[in-house]
Image (tube, rainbow, N blue to C red):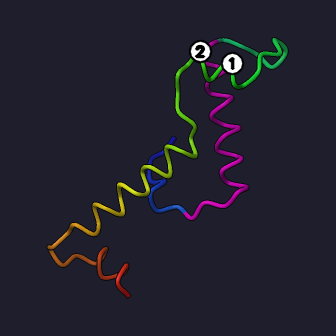
């Protein structure tokens, strides 16, 4: 679900949609439906999965560090310096 998110420009709407999708996936993992009326916080405790927004932010910082450490002259660092 997070493949390529390092380069995305995240808006609040997109973060919301990612969270909704993550909650749906976690409910499917546990076999819980919306009719069971179990809160998302409880499902998150059961699955022990980190929030998608936090994960994407961490991946963005890791990718930025990776790009700045490059010394091979590829375009990634040049674009950031432009």
Q: Residue at x 40, y 57 (%)?
A: 61
Residue at image position (71%, 47%) is: 16
Compared to residue 10, the image places residue 22 above or below, namely: above
- In magenta segment, residue 43: no
- Residue 10, given in percent of the width and then of the height, sits at 60, 60
Determine the image quadrant of residue 20: top right
Q: Quadrant of residue 37?
A: top right
Position of residue 19 in the picture relative to residue 2 (left or right): right
Image mark for residue 25:
none
Q: CA distance from mark 2 to mark 1?
A: 6 Å
Which x, y percent locates residue 19? 66, 40
Give percent across and percent down for residue 78: 30, 82
Secondary element at image label 2: helix
Q: Which residue is mark 2?
A: 46
- The residues colored magenta run 9-30
Q: Nearer the viewer, residue 41 or 27?
A: 41
In the foreground, 49 or 74:
49
Question: Does dot 1 land on a helix, a strand or a loop?
Answer: helix
Left or right: 3 in relation to 17: left
**Measuring 18% from the left and 78% from the top, which residue is drawn there?**
73
Q: Nearer the viewer, residue 63 or 8?
A: 63
Q: Is residue 14 magenta?
A: yes
Q: Which residue is mark 1?
A: 42
In this rendering, would 79 be left or right of 51?
A: left
Mark 2 and mark 1 residues within 8 Å of each other at the beta carbon: yes
Q: Residues within 10 Å of mark 1 (few under 14, many from 20)?
A: few
The residue carrying pointer 2 sits among few (fewer than 14), some (14 to 19) or many (20 or more) residues within 10 Å by Cα, namely few
Provide residue 63's location: percent of width, then percent of height: 35, 58
Task: Residue at the far bottom: name it.
Answer: 82
């Amino acid at each position: 679900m997070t493949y390529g998110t390092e380069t995305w420009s995240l808006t609040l709407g997109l973060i919301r949609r990612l969270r909704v999708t993550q909650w749906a996936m976690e409910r499917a993992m546990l076999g819980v439906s919306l009719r069971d009326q179990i809160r998302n916080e409880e499902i998150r405790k059961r699955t022990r999965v980190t929030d998608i927004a936090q994960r994407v932010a961490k991946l963005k910082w890791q990718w930025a560090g990776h790009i700045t450490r490059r010394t091979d002259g590829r375009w990634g660092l040049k674009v950031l310096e432009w």
